[in-house]
Image (tube, grey):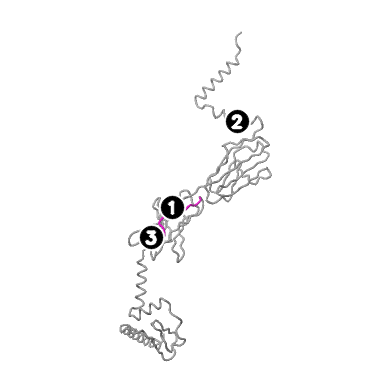
Amino acid sequence: MCASAELVLLALAALLATAGSSERWRRAAGEAPGPLAIEVAGPVSGLEVGGVTGGVAGAVPGGLPGEMTAEEAAAAEAEAAGVPAWRELWYSSLEAMRREPSFNNTQEDALVQLGGVAFLHCPVRNLGERGVSWVRRRDWHIISSGVFMYTNDERFQVLHSEGSDDWILQIKYVQKRDNGTYECQVSTGSGTLSRLVHLHIAVPEAFILGADEYHVDAGSTINLVCIIEKSPVPPQYVFWYHNARMINYDAARGVTVATAPGARTQSALRIHHAAPAHSGNYSCRAPNTEPAHIHVYVSEGSDKMAATLSRNSSARRPRGPAAALAALALMAAAAAARAPRPG
């Protein structure tokens, strides 16, 4: 700034100080504050004049730039009362620092499906310059401080937007071991402020209606229904397998699959004109769900009864040394029955 401008500023400062003293004298005398007129001879470039209660009038080119804001008015009044504006700002900042942080609530439950993404929220009011930390209560492991992570598990991340009160702990591809309580902490002058988030991992369950075995005659239709429940979000797909082969699209072999997603997703498998080759293990599988299994037997007439009797007898057959003795006894009895009787 040139020397002439500096001289003008000094002159204005002296006038403003005089105006402030005069205003305080008027207030002490009980007089109403009057307008203050300051005349500046000649144009002053790059100079703004303001901050005096009652308005400033003069030969400043362009006049004053509109009405003052509430903060400017408060600063002007404080200046007129003899209190520097910087001190008012300092007091207001100090008052903001003295406010204690707080939460809307201190506990929350979050339900996330296995394999999904968990968002654990921690909204803090009046945080100021303090930091927010996330701790896993199961092993008291410090996960983060601010946006800095203290874990090698890349599934964890802290999300925070500038100006937001919410500090969000994000966990991708949640697993069963992520189930548990997480604590959001803020250190204050009087101790530690905590908020608990209880994370519940929902594990969908699948089962096939009926018994563990399904018997059907050759030439008839195989009908299997798979139910998937305890899934907050319906599965994106349900696949059916015959042994190790996926058969959802085997329309040429008489296979059709119809799936109805919902709170209890149902998937129906139909195989027309069943043949012995269709026998085997069948399973229905969905994302992040334990598969359900059933064994299908396709028999022709008497073969079905023979297979059933064979399985029942094998289930009742004794095992170990007793089984060997029983077998020897049966063999001896059979040999005695075949031996010719003396005349």
Instruction: Identify the residue under disc 3.
Output: 186
Query: Which residue carries the number 1 mark?
Result: 198
Which of discs 2 and 1 lies nearer the camera? The answer is: 1
Q: Is residue 324 magenta?
A: no
Residue that label 2 marks: 308
Amino acid at pointer 2:
Thr
Binning the other alpha carbons within 10 Å of mark 2 as few (below 14), some (14 to 19) or many (20 upward) gives some
Indicate the amino acid at tag 3. Val
In the rendered view, tell whether residue 151 sits above or below residue 298. Answer: below
Q: Position of residue 177 (x, y in %)?
A: 46, 49
Circle 3 SS class:
strand
| Image quarter hosting the N terminus | bottom left
Q: Amino acid at mark 1?
A: His
Q: Which tag is nearer the camera, tag 3 or tag 1?
A: 1
Q: Earlier in the sequence, mark 2 or mark 3?
A: 3
| Disc 3 and disc 1 in contact, CB within 8 angstroms | no
Decide which of tag 3 and tag 1 comes sooner along the chain.
3
Magenta segment: 104-113
Q: Residues within 10 Å of mark 3 (few under 14, many from 20)?
A: some
